């Protein structure tokens, strides 16, 4: 993974230069008056940046540097990864702490993640090592996605999801062999609030981050009962309101701990699909105050993509966020380098193979746009 990061970011360094300017949320040390109570002096000051250069640390990579590692080995692996990132101007990492009803941190709510087989706390180590290097850490959670049915059978009976299923509660639904929270219910929204509060209360993270796992299906049967009880006339509008409700709760929970902490959302890049397939009201979130601080659309398209060319989609997101206080950070896909893009259309299928400089060019385009930064998924 270190080689992938170094190769993909090498050219980007010459475009971005040194680390972006610290925002007013900087954790730089200041003189504190002796008259200030000690508990106030010791309060953590979140570290964030005006221009974000982000990097996702997803659970799918955990086997490479977590599984089968001792605490010392994991710390060494993380330190080297962060050194590579910092050398190439990355100033923010989104660490996958809650991918699917599990925890890569010390949780009283969720079972530990399957790739964590050592006796240590990954999030605590990532926070410590990142902050040593001046890198901001945002805890990345998937709000609705849970374990597969098979995985769930192996978990303790007192796990709240298993208790809900055993009691026949409608709060969780099985879709294609995987369980998901149904956001229509206050109980699920409260569980999400507790999840955020647990992370924020235990760790000096600099924010929380969610990605594009919202409604797992458009099937009307998923939540027919709750919709009929709601009395609302339109299913799609009702679902979008459900998602916006828990997004708002997560934002408010983050701000209840510290107004300087950030809450970010990373939806898929296609705005119409966000709106109509996952019922993610990105127009509202990016345009109204109180839903997120930054939004990171995953514009994982090449310049020649037949249905969603990169520059066209970038323009759409710029227009959507125009005049808003929400920061626009563009998600890019170096993981596609050297691979066929079979969904891009015949003319663009080999673009990521034939143009090894595509990420460098996309970063340049972002720097010329009104966006406030970019983030990289490997």
Image (tube, grey):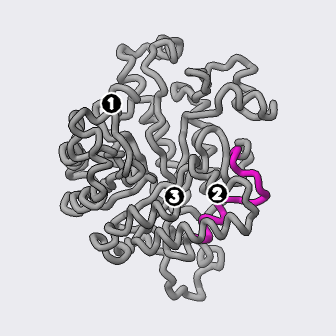
Front residue (pair 345, 243): 345
Element type where label 1 sits in the image: helix
Quick check: is 100 in the magenta stretch? no
* Residue 136, visible in the rendered structure: yes
Front residue (pair 118, 325): 118
* Residue 259, visible in the rendered structure: no
Q: Position of residue 72 (x, y in %)?
A: 73, 69
Residue name at image x 61 percent, y 33 percent: 146
Q: Position of residue 331 (x, y in %)?
A: 36, 51
Residue name at image x 40 percent, y 56 percent: 376
Q: Say if 293 sits above or below 48 in the image.
A: above
Front residue (pair 39, 355): 355
Kindly identify which residue carries mark 3.
138
**Gap in Å between the C-alphas at discs 3 and 1?**
26 Å
**Gap in Å between the C-alphas at discs 1 and 2?**
34 Å
**Gap in Å between the C-alphas at discs 3 and 2?**
14 Å
Q: Say if 299 sits above or below 374 in the image.
A: above
Kindly identify which residue carries mark 1.
273
Kindly identify which residue carries mark 2.
201
Residue name at image x 60 percent, y 74 percent: 40
Q: Are marks 1 and 2 in contact (CB under 8 Å)?
A: no
Front residue (pair 268, 359): 359
Element type where label 2 sits in the image: helix
**Residue numbers of the magenta segment:** 113-129
N-term mark: 3 or 2: 3
N-term mark: 1 or 2: 2
Q: Are marks 3 and 2 in contact (CB under 8 Å)?
A: no
Other-residue count near label 3 (Cα within 10 Å), few / some / many at <14 / 14–19 / ≥20: many
Q: Position of residue 199 (x, y in %)?
A: 62, 53
Q: Position of residue 338 (x, y in %)?
A: 37, 50
Other-residue count near label 2 (Cα within 10 Å), few / some / many at <14 / 14–19 / ≥20: few
* Closer mark to the observer between disc 1 and disc 2: 1
């Amino acid at each position: 993974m270190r080689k992938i990061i170094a190769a993909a970011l090498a050219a980007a360094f010459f475009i971005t230069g040194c680390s972006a300017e610290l925002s007013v949320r900087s954790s730089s040390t200041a003189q504190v008056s002796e008259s200030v109570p000690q508990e106030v002096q010791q309060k953590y000051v979140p570290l964030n940046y005006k221009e974000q250069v982000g990097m996702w640390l997803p659970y799918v990579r955990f086997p490479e540097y977590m599984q089968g590692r001792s605490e010392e080995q994991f710390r060494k692996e993380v330190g080297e990864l962060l050194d590579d990132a910092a050398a190439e101007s990355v100033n923010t990492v989104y660490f996958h702490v809650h991918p699917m009803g599990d925890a890569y941190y010390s949780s009283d709510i969720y079972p530990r993640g399957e790739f964590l087989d050592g006796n240590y706390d990954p999030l605590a180590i990532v926070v410590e090592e990142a902050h040593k290097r001046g890198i901001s850490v945002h805890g990345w959670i998937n709000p609705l996605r849970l374990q597969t049915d098979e995985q769930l059978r192996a978990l303790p009976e007192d796990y709240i999801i298993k208790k809900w299923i055993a009691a026949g509660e409608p709060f969780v639904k099985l879709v294609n062999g995987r369980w998901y929270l149904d956001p229509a219910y206050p109980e699920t929204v409260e569980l999400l609030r507790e999840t955020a509060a647990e992370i924020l209360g235990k760790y000096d993270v600099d924010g929380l981050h969610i990605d594009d796992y919202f409604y797992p299906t458009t099937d009307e049967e998923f939540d027919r009962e709750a919709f009929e009880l709601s009395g609302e006339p339109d299913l799609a509008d009702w679902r979008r309101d459900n998602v916006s409700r828990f997004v708002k709760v997560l934002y408010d929970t983050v701000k209840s701990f510290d107004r300087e902490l950030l809450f970010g959302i990373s939806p898929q890049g296609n705005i119409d699909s966000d709106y109509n397939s996952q019922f993610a009201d990105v127009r509202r979130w990016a345009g109204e105050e109180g839903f997120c601080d930054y939004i990171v659309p995953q514009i994982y398209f090449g310049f020649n993509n037949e249905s969603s060319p990169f520059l066209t989609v970038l323009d759409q997101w710029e227009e959507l966020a125009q005049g808003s206080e929400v920061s626009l950070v563009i998600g890019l896909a170096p993981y596609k380098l050297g691979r066929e893009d079979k969904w891009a259309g015949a003319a663009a299928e080999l673009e990521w193979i034939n143009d090894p400089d595509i990420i460098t060019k996309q970063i340049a385009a972002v720097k010329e746009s009104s966006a406030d930064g970019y983030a990289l998924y490997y």
